[in-house]
């Protein structure tokens, strides 16, 4: 396996990602959209999820595909970003046909970033507009770190952010991950100088810091304010492939991808995290041996997610009023 040419989820043909953020708000939205509807499912392992239209992604539900997936800050307010995406897709003539009507299907998940010192004293919910802007910004090349849904994200020790990574498998199938990293836990070891994900790094993509020479089984210290740690956190992600998968197979890929979250964030899947992984498949490449290849896809998705989480923290940049340092600033880089 090797990273794709961009090392982004958009190495999968037909997928684009758009970001929109507000520096004063210290929050934002990220949208994954396909050139055509794609198959999708979801796996939720955290104890405090915030979602929209995830029920229709269950394998026994009738919706054949979705038009876009949304990751957003803003806690429950941020779910409104999907409405902005939905309205814009409808204006573009996109959507699931129901006789003479069209209904864009836009599942969404949110993270809690309401206590990060951003200005949240709005009169009108800003997230529908951020969703619309993110969709209109969608392209194959996009920025990581303090962007989109990762704008106001925080980990236990450092600023979080938006991350992505990809892999091309031996049979030519591509897998990618996109993630907004805002967990209760830490992405770095207790020393604060090495990533839990270090052994999965490729080509120095998150700094080449190496494995911690003095590993510890203690939980990393948390610098998050007490209210933040107790009220809400969450790592929300999308893994995707150009393989032809049905909804049940997408669900299995999403379940497997959670292994990557557990490798990169300690602790993960806590009662205060809404940890969630969407899985998407564009269907471009049929599987010759589905049973064997689906296992390989899940493995690749978990590795991509591990790497994407570390990249999110590595690429974070400082902003006025931050309550936590970036990892690079703390390392003096």
Image (tube, helix red, strand yellow):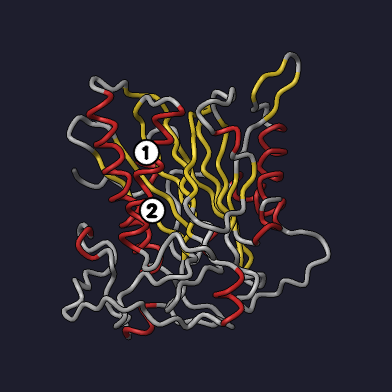
Q: Residues within 10 Å of mark 2 (few under 14, many from 20)?
A: many
Label 2 to label 1: alpha-carbon separation: 17 Å
Q: Residues within 10 Å of mark 1 (few under 14, many from 20)?
A: many
**Residue shown at 31% from the left, 40% from the top:** 298
Residue 210 appears in which quarter of the rendering?
bottom left
**Residue shown at 64% from the left, 24% from the top:** 96
Relative side of 284 to 92, left or right? left
Farthest-out residue, top:
99
Q: Position of residue 231 (x, y in %)?
A: 61, 70
Q: Position of residue 91 (x, y in %)?
A: 72, 33
Tell me the element at label 2.
strand
Give the answer, above or below, for where 93 lies relative to 188.
above
Residue beneath disc 2: 164
Q: Position of residue 227 (x, y in %)?
A: 61, 78
Relative side of 122 to 308, left or right? right
Give the answer, above or below, for where 221 lies relative to 87.
below
Relative side of 251 to 128, left or right? left
Tell me the element at label 1.
helix
**Residue shown at 37% from the left, 24% from the top:** 244
Mark 2 / mark 1, whichever is N-terminal: 2
Q: Position of residue 190 (x, y in %)?
A: 31, 80
Residue beneath disc 1: 253
Farthest-out residue, right:
123
């Amino acid at each position: 396996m090797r990273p794709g040419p961009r090392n982004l989820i958009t190495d999968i043909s037909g997928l684009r990602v758009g970001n929109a953020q507000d520096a004063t708000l210290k929050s934002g939205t990220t949208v994954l959209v396909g050139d055509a509807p794609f198959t999708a499912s979801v796996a939720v392992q955290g104890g405090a999820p915030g979602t929209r239209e995830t029920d229709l992604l269950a394998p026994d539900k009738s919706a054949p595909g979705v038009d876009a997936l949304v990751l957003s800050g803003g806690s429950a307010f941020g779910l409104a970003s999907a409405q902005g995406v939905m309205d814009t897709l409808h204006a573009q003539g996109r959507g699931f046909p129901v006789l003479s009507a069209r209904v864009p299907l836009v599942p969404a998940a949110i993270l809690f970033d309401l206590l990060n010192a951003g200005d949240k004293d709005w009169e009108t919910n800003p997230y529908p507009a951020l969703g619309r802007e993110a969709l209109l910004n969608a392209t194959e090349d996009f920025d990581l770190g303090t962007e989109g849904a990762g704008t106001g994200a925080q980990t236990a020790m450092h600023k979080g952010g938006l991350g992505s990574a990809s892999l091309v498998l031996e049979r030519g199938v591509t897998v990618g991950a996109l993630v907004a990293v805002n967990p209760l836990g830490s992405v770095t070891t207790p020393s604060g100088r090495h990533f839990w994900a270090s052994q999965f790094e490729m080509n120095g993509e998150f700094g080449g810091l190496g494995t911690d020479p003095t590993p510890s089984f203690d939980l990393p210290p948390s610098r998050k304010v007490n209210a933040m740690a107790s009220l809400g956190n969450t790592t929300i992600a999308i893994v995707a492939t150009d393989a032809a998968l049905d909804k049940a197979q997408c669900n299995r890929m999403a379940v497997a991808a959670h292994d990557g979250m557990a490798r990169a964030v300690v602790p993960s899947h806590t009662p205060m995290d809404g940890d969630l992984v969407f899985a998407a498949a564009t269907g471009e490449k049929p599987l010759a041996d589905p049973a064997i290849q689906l296992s390989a896809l899940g493995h690749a998705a978990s590795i991509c997610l591990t790497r994407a989480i570390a990249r999110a923290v590595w690429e974070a940049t400082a902003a006025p009023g931050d309550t936590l340092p970036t990892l690079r600033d703390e390392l003096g880089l």
